[in-house]
Image: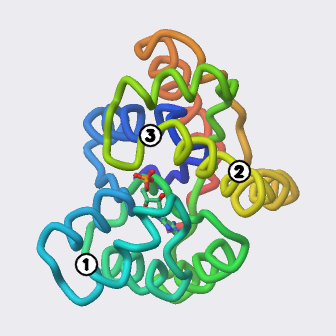
């Protein structure tokens, strides 16, 4: 059962590619952004807490995210794709603990590389409420400061694969598909 983590800046295509791979391999896609937006829409306590951070283009506190991901991973089948989590070093460390508790491991971490100017254009077209140009630039800054260090974190663990995300969706998908198949056959998945 493939278990993957998607890194990459906002607008790199993580959601789109994660969805395609989840369909392909019949596994769950866990998008923390989608989960948070559902909480905001349902006006739950958690949603109310998260909303101000999301509206400002900032990250929601780590403890909130770790709780969401823990309850999700505990309740689904063992194959999954994480889209948008972890986004900070404390989240990455919490994920290691969580997976040890669940006797699971991940086989690869994929970083989708896309240049900033392409991202800004893509996100302006997407038109979500947090896709205003000033907020996009702020989210990119937050990404550089808080999430980019994860690239080195996973590189040191020899799990990182870099993929050029500035190409046609189906070309990127084909590359990801073969990458996942190769990672699986290398036996990185322990359970
Ligand atoms: P996304 O749809 O992945 O771009 O996420 C939208 C917003 O949800 C982000 O700008 C953050 O405010 C919040 N969010 C999603 N995932 C996380 C995470 N792992 N840690 C902190 N905040 C997150």
Which residue is tagged 3? 132
Res. 25 mark: none
Q: Nearer the viewer, mark 3 or mark 1?
A: 3
Tell me how many marks there are. 3
x and y percentages locating residue 150 in the rendered image: 75, 59
Is the distance from the Cβ of mark 1 to the nearest ligand 1 atom less than 8 Å?
Answer: no
Residue found farthest to the front: 134
Task: State which tag comes first along the sequence, 2 or 3.
Answer: 3
Above/below status of 178 relative to 189: above
- Label 3 packing within 10 angstroms: few (<14), some (14-19), many (20+): some
In the image, residue 170 lies at what x, y percent?
A: 41, 13
Q: Label 3, label 1: how many angstroms apart (C-alpha)?
A: 35 Å
For label 2, count other residues whose C-alpha is less than 10 Å away and answer few (under 14), some (14-19) or many (20+). some
Q: How is the image coloured?
A: rainbow
Q: Position of residue 97 (x, y in %)?
A: 61, 85
Label 3 secondary element: loop
- Against 18, residue 165 (above or below) is above
The local secondary structure at tag 1 comes to: helix
Q: Are marks 3 and 1 in contact (CB under 8 Å)?
A: no
Judge from the rendering whether residue 151 lies leftward or rightward of residue 95; answer left or right.
Answer: right
Residue tagged 2: 141
Tag in front: 2 or 3: 3
In the image, what residue occupies the spot 51% across and 88% down? Answer: 63
Label ID, residue 75: 1
Residue visible at 42% across and 41% down in the picture: 131
Asked if disc 1 and disc 2 are in contact, CB closer than 8 Å, the reply is no
């Amino acid at each position: 059962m493939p278990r993957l983590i998607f890194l990459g800046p906002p607008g790199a295509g993580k959601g789109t590619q994660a969805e395609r791979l989840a369909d392909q391999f019949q596994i769950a896609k866990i998008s923390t952004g989608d989960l948070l937006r559902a909480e905001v829409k349902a006006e739950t306590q958690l949603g109310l807490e998260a909303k101000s951070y999301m509206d400002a283009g900032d990250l929601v506190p780590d403890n909130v995210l770790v709780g969401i991901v823990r309850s999700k991973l505990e309740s689904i089948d063992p194959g999954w794709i994480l889209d948008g989590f972890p986004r900070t070093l404390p989240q990455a460390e919490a994920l290691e603990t969580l997976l040890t508790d669940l006797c699971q491991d991940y086989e690869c971490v994929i970083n989708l590389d896309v240049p900033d100017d392409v991202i800004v254009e893509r996100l302006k077209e997407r038109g979500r409420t947090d896709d205003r140009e000033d907020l996009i630039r702020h989210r990119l800054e937050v990404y550089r400061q808080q999430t980019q260090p994860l690239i080195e974190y996973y590189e040191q663990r020899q799990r990182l694969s870099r993929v050029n995300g500035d190409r046609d969706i189906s070309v990127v998908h084909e590359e990801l598909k073969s990458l996942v198949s190769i990672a699986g056959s290398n036996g990185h998945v322990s359970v």
